[in-house]
Image (cartoon, rainbow, N blue to C red):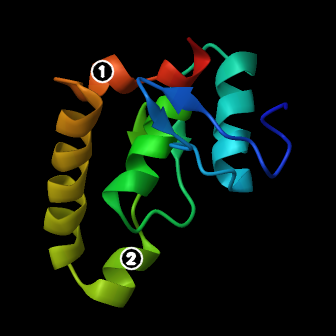
Amino acid sequence: MRPGDRSWPIVWEGYQDLLSGHWRFAAWYEIYQAVAIPIVGMGGVSSGRDAIEMIMAGATAVGIGSAVYQDGPEVFGCIEHEMATLMVKLGYESVAQMRGAAHL
């Protein structure tokens, strides 16, 4: 299946369905393939998993807006903690290692 399909699963390091098929992650995946400039992933990021999905799809940075409004500034710590936990589970030591990993 192509990333534009809404049911697009990715298998990476034995972790099935990291990119969970949401259209926004498929969009970052396609943008990453089309341009040679840094990409800021934005839109619906409210968890570490959301941020990692965007980074693995190719985002250089991730914007967090609505989650701050909804949950307050504590959301940054929650997202950071969840990202760190998932990175260990997936075997990554840095965000740079994850960037674009869905394209490998």
**Crowdedness near tag 2: few (<14), some (14–19) or many (≥20) residues, C-alpha within 10 Å:** some
Q: What is the quadrant of residue 15 in the picture?
A: top left
Q: Which mark is residue 87?
A: none
When the figure is inspected, residue 32 is found, relative to residue 70, above or below; the finding is above
**Crowdedness near tag 1: few (<14), some (14–19) or many (≥20) residues, C-alpha within 10 Å:** few
Image-based side of 37 in relation to 62, left or right: right
Q: Which residue is mark 1?
A: 96
Quadrant where the C terminus is found in the figure: top right
Disc 2 secondary structure class: helix
Q: Residue at x 36, y 64 (%)?
A: 47
At label 1, the amino acid type is Ala
When the figure is inspected, residue 6 is found, relative to residue 96, above or below; the finding is below
At label 2, the amino acid type is Ala
When the figure is inspected, residue 67 is found, relative to residue 44, above or below; the finding is below
The answer, for residue 58, to whether it is visible in the render is no
The answer, for residue 9, to whether it is visible in the render is yes
Q: CA distance from mark 1 to mark 2?
A: 24 Å
Q: Residue at x 85, y 32 (%)?
A: 1
Image-based side of 24 in relation to 70, left or right: right
Disc 1 secondary structure class: helix
Q: What is the quadrant of residue 75 in the picture?
A: bottom left
Image-based side of 37 in relation to 3, left or right: left
Q: Residue at x 37, y 25 (%)?
A: 98
**Looking at the picture, how far across and down is residue 13, in whole percent?**
41, 23
Mark 1 vs mark 2: which is more N-terminal? 2
Q: Which residue is mark 2?
A: 67
Image-based side of 50 in relation to 93, left or right: right
When the figure is inspected, residue 50 is found, relative to residue 93, above or below; the finding is below
Q: Residue furthest bottom?
A: 70
